[in-house]
Amino acid sequence: MKFSPLFWPVTLQGKTIRILDETALPHRLVYLTSHGYSDSCAAIKNMKTRAVGQVLLVMYTFLLEIEKHRNTKTLIPHLEKVARSLNATRPTLSFKMLTDMVLGWARSGAPLAQTITGFLDMLKVRRIEQAEKASTLLSGNECVLTHCNVSGLMPLIGEMCRKQNKDISFFVTETRPYLQGARLTSWELQRAGFDVTVISDTMVAHVMSEDKINSVIVGADHLALNGDFANKIGTYQIALLAKYFEIPLYVLCPPPSHAQTGDDIPIEIRPDKELLEFNGIRIAPRGVKGYYPAFDITPAELVTRHIYLEIR
């Protein structure tokens, strides 16, 4: 099975965490390093890694801190401090379920490093199973629209479709303002040998009206108990359009949080300069304000099928 570098973009090597710098793609395939939780928090805040990369970085950071902190009497207070720092990085993709899980293992006296490693092994298997489920929902000669980036799952879904003798191509939205679709998704799909076409976020209705799209597959950063989900800003409007044009919408979901509905999911508002500047160059007049909610909420009734990541 071939995997995109984005499928597992963070690894622990000795006392150093290697983080694929997603902001450098597609021009450079480079890795950053973290030597502790402060480095890891900075990488998350600055979007050097995102989606599943953040989950991996949280877990590998705990492994690194456990290795560094040999005093068993103060280990749990130290891990609690690490958890608070990680939980404060980005509000919409909640790490609290992960950090609570690790702290629960620590307080129970479980073999902590072994348990975390076992969880990561299971996560890798479950992600492959999630891609397999998605591939079975697609027919042959199908064009899939995707938005943002789902950390290596899209080329994996395509690869599984190939093995099922299905011909799959892709339309990828640019995904403003960081262009995760144009930079990351198109890169990994082309690298895997798929026919991929990039469109702007504003072209979706027109392209759907031309009958160029057969299905939509997106990710989810946060899933509520009722099936509402938060994903990269722009997902909601795509879901509305898919409903209008009677195109199935499939969502690759994490396990649900304790949020009852989408109204309970906090929306991260990122710095307005990320809209007003590009690669450090000002693109809007001085004095103009920007507003950048990084996520939006898509109601469950717009979803054809939730494809769950089964963590058990």
Image (cartoon, helix red, strand yellow):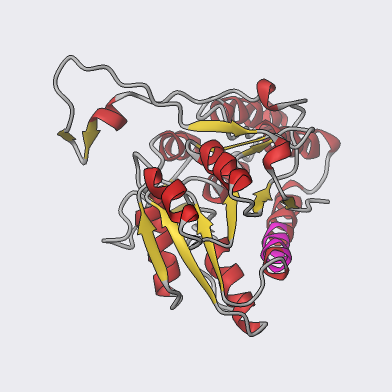
The rendered magenta stretch, by its main secondary structure, is classed as helix
Give the left or right position of residue 114, taking residue 192 as reference: right
> Is residue 126 part of the magenta span, yes or no?
yes
Horizontal side of 97 relative to 292 (left or right) equals: right
Q: Residue 80, located in which quarter of the rendered image? A: top right
194 vs 14, nearest the viewer = 194
User: Can you see residue 81?
Assistant: yes
Span colored in magenta: 123-133
- The residue lying at 54 percent from left, 71 percent from top is 3
Q: Any magenta on residue 195?
A: no
**Quarter of the rendering occupied by the N terminus:** bottom right
List x then y, in percent, for residue 202: 38, 43
Count of numbered tags: 0
The x and y percentages for residue 192 are 46, 75
Give the residue drawn at x 80%, y 33%.
107
Image quadrant assignment for residue 87? top right
Instruction: Return the x and y of residue 290 as percentages of the image width and height.
Output: 31, 21
Picture layout, residue 227 above or below residue 148: above
| In-front residue for pair 70/180 | 180
Q: Position of residue 126 (x, y in %)?
A: 73, 60
From the viewer's perspective, is residue 301 above or below residue 251? above
Residue 59 seen in this snapshot: no
- Image point 63% across, 44% down: which residue? 243
**Residue at left offset 72%, top offset 70%:** 136
In the rendered image, the vertical position of residue 231 relative to residue 31, given as above or below: above
Determine whether, in the image, residue 83 is placed left or right of residue 112: left
Q: Which residue lies furthest to the top in this view?
A: 287
